[in-house]
Image (tube, helix red, strand yellow):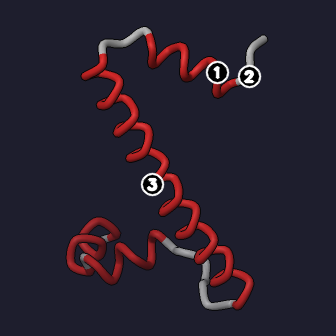
Amino acid sequence: MKPFKEQVIEALEQLPEGLQQRAVAYIFEQAEKYKVLKEELEKGDADIEAGRLREWDLDDFLRRAIPDRVEAKTE
């Protein structure tokens, strides 16, 4: 099996030149999104390790967000 980078080059070469440029731009966009996501996940992990986060309680959130509606359903 060919190395991955060679496969990508072959696939791009099969496209018309205009589509090659768009395909490469799309790959770069996805790579940037992945980089940002990875950085945000690392920040979240650091927050967890530092004890700056607490477990999220959906019921508590809903009670505080819409108190009248939740109370009406429990009556």
Say whether residue 4 is left or right of residue 9: right
Tag 2 secondary structure: loop
Q: In front of the other: label 2 or label 3?
A: 2
Residue farthest along the right direction in this orientation: 1
Task: Please report contact status of discs 2 and 1: CB closer than 8 Å, yes or no.
Answer: yes
Which residue does the numbered mark 3 point to in the structure image? Answer: 32
Say whether residue 55 is left or right of residue 19: right
* Residue lying at 74% horizontally and 22% vertically, measured from the top left: 3
Quick one: label 1, few (<14), some, or many (20+) residues within 10 Å? few
Which residue does the numbered mark 2 point to in the structure image? Answer: 3
Q: Amino acid at mark 1?
A: Glu
Which residue does the numbered mark 1 point to in the structure image? Answer: 6
Quick one: label 3, few (<14), some, or many (20+) residues within 10 Å? few
Q: Amino acid at mark 2?
A: Pro
Q: In front of the other: label 3 or label 1?
A: 1
Relative to residue 68, is residue 36 depicted above or below?
above
Q: Quadrant of residue 70?
A: bottom left
Q: Amino acid at mark 3?
A: Glu
Task: Tell me residue 22's x, y (percent).
Answer: 30, 31
Distance in Å between CA atoms under marks 2 and 1:
5 Å
Does label 3 or label 1 sit earlier along the sequence?
1
